[in-house]
Amino acid sequence: MKNVLLLTVVVGTLALSGCAVAPNSSNVYQSRQTMGEQSVRMGVVESIRNVVIDNGQSGVGTLGGAALGGLAGSTIGQGNGSIAAAIGGAIAGGVIGQHVEQNMNSKPGLEITVKLDNGALTAITQAADEQFNVGDRVRLLSNGRTTRVTH
């Protein structure tokens, strides 16, 4: 019964942690970003480079994986064998959980270098959720803190 309760708590925690992730996209505006003026600069795409955007790790994957691995390992054997299996399961589960969280928190991005109409070069990194090609005429929208490239 304790194992079922622990499993329920861990799975619930992992499920709820997915709800806290805010969309990070050049096509998504958070409510605090609306109704504010943005400066617009025009330019042409000079180059595009694929990158990975890493949103970091909270540790939930490692902890959740370790808890589930330890729980699963504790059901193997008896006495010291069960303890050893629980420890091994916790270590393996933690490593697997860390990799799962890392993969979930990383997404494809683009480093877009733009030659502005005034001749200056600038580069912006953003989510790869819009297709750009070298030579595209683009707009750079900036609020003084962040800049995004759009068509």
Image (cartoon, rainbow, N blue to C red):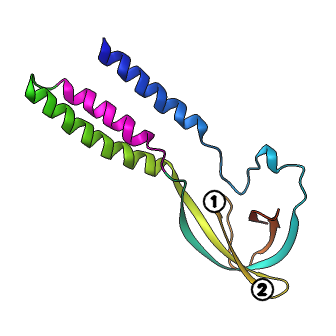
**Residue positioned 47% across, 25% down in the render:** 12
Q: Position of residue 11 (x, y in %)?
A: 43, 27
**Residue positioned 10% across, 25% down in the render:** 77
| Quadrant of image for the C terminus | bottom right
Q: Position of residue 136 (x, y in %)?
A: 75, 75
**Residue positioned 82% across, 62% down in the render:** 143
Q: Main secondary structure of the magenta part?
A: helix
Q: Position of residue 103 (x, y in %)?
A: 45, 51
**Residue at the extreme top:** 1
- In this picture, residue 10 sits left or right of residue 40: left
> In the rendered image of this protein, does residue 17 appear above or below residue 118?
above
**Residue positioned 9% across, 23% down in the render:** 79
Q: Which residue is mark 1?
A: 127
Residue sitting nearer the eye, 74 or 26: 74
> Residue type at mark 1?
Ala
Q: Position of residue 108 (x, y in %)?
A: 55, 60
**Which region is colored magenta?**
57-75
The part of the image, by quadrant, that contains residue 36 is bottom right
Label 2 element class = loop
Q: Which residue is mark 2?
A: 120
Tell me, for residue 38, which label it has, or none: none
Residue sitting nearer the eye, 138 or 75: 75
Is 11 a magenta residue?
no
Residue sitting nearer the eye, 85 or 137: 85
